[in-house]
Image (spheres, rainbow, N blue to C red):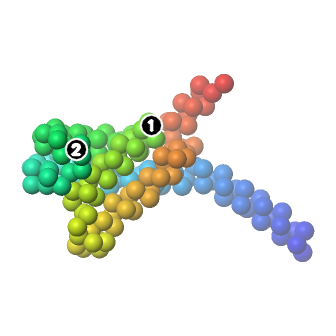
Amino acid sequence: MLTTIIPLWNRTTDLLDETGRWIAPLGLRLLLAWEFWESGVEKFKGDNWFADIQDRFPFPFDLLPVDFSWFVATWVELIGAWLLVFGLATRIISAKLIVLTLVAWAAVHAGNGYNVCDNGFKLPLIYLVLFLPLLLSGPGKASLDHLIKQRFAR
């Protein structure tokens, strides 16, 4: 019985591992892309409210002009969302969006506790945890980064 179950289990987990190399990072990228796209569109269509919170930005971001910070945040979110969708420059854009999320945590969410309903830090924390596999392991096989790496591999 065990001689049948163990090989079947091994084949099943091998199949899940291989599928996971394609699907799991893609799911993370698409979820994060949607979240940051929505945030970028809000900024693009809305008024700059960074002046109200600039004093809470961590150093050195508190030294930058609020119009510049708004512009950078908007376009990092918008362009970053598309890069995540396609899995292009995933580690670089993940690092940029992690920094953006940390600044948002400090300036907007830090003093509000954990609860999302109180504008707390739950969502930024979730985003940071979701970015870790993309930053550390890459975008997965369903990505342009993977295709480029395969094309230029030795």
Q: Which residue is mark 2?
A: 61
Instruction: Report the side of 98 relative to 87 (left or right).
Output: left
Instruction: Report the side of 50 relative to 29 (left or right).
Output: left
Query: Which image quadrant: the N terminus?
Result: bottom right
Q: Which residue is mark 1?
A: 88
Residue 35, by quadrant, is bottom left
Callout 1 secondary element: loop
Q: Nearer the viewer, residue 54 or 30?
A: 54
Q: Position of residue 117 (x, y in %)?
A: 24, 73
Count neighbours of disc 1 (C-alpha within 10 A) and say few if under 14, some if 14 to 19, many if 20 or more: some
Q: Amino acid at mark 2?
A: Phe
Callouts 1 and 2 close, C-beta under 8 Å: no
Q: State whether residue 58 is above or below residue 111.
A: above
Q: State whether residue 60 is above or below residue 34.
A: above
Q: CA distance from mark 1 to mark 2?
A: 26 Å
Q: Residue at x 59, y 27 (%)?
A: 151
Q: Amino acid at mark 1?
A: Leu
Q: Is residue 137 visible?
A: yes
